Image (cartoon, grey):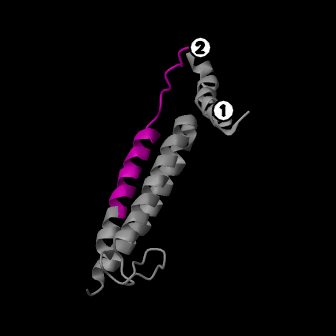
Amino acid sequence: MNKKSIQLFGIFLALLLPVGASAQSFAPREPRPEIRRSGSQKFLRISMAVLAAATVADTASSWNRRELNPLLQGPNGRFGAKGMSLKFGLAGSVISVQWLVTRKAPQTERTFAITNLALSGLLSGVAIHNSLLPR
């Protein structure tokens, strides 16, 4: 086999493997019973919103100030776009992972909600501290 035919065979396999792997999705499924959730799902959603708001408040209070965390520092040692991207990315990742986990394991909703509220309290405290510092 020459190099061109090996490349074509590789492309063929790359296109064929996902179709073969998803063949079971064409099989008829039994309908899943509707899962009744308690108030913990609502509690989790509220805590996610509070976590997002606390992240925004912390970011706003830190903007263009000297940053002590080297991971969040910009090139001039201040909090800027780099720090904001990392903070929002981390908060978004935490919320996304929680959402995915709770779909498969609803019993974790309350634990995640309490964790979100604790983290929100920490971020809110940092935001208040930053707001009290002189510019």
Of residue 28 and residue 3, the one placed in the foreground of this image is 3
Is 91 displayed left or right of 28 in the figure? left
- Asked where in the image residue 60 lies, by quadrant, the reply is bottom left
Q: Nearer the viewer, mark 1 or mark 2?
A: 1
Question: Quick one: which residue is furthest to the bottom in this view?
Answer: 134
Is 117 displayed left or right of 11 in the figure? left
What is the spatial separation of the Cα atoms under label 1 and label 2, in whole angstroms? 34 Å
Dot 1 or dot 2, earlier in sequence:
1
Is 127 displayed left or right of 86 in the figure? left
Residue type at numbered disc 1: Ser
| Residue 8, x across and y down, in percent | 62, 32
Q: Which residue is mark 1?
A: 5
Tell me the magenta residue range.
28-55
**53, above or below 4, in the image:** below
Element type at mark 2: loop
- Asked where in the image residue 64 lies, by quadrant, the reply is bottom left
Q: Is residue 110 magenta?
A: no
| Image point (60%, 33%), residue name | 11
How packed mark 1 is, by other alpha carbons closer than 10 Å (few <14, some 14-19, many 20 or more), is few
Q: Which residue is mark 2?
A: 27
| Image point (46%, 60%), residue name | 90
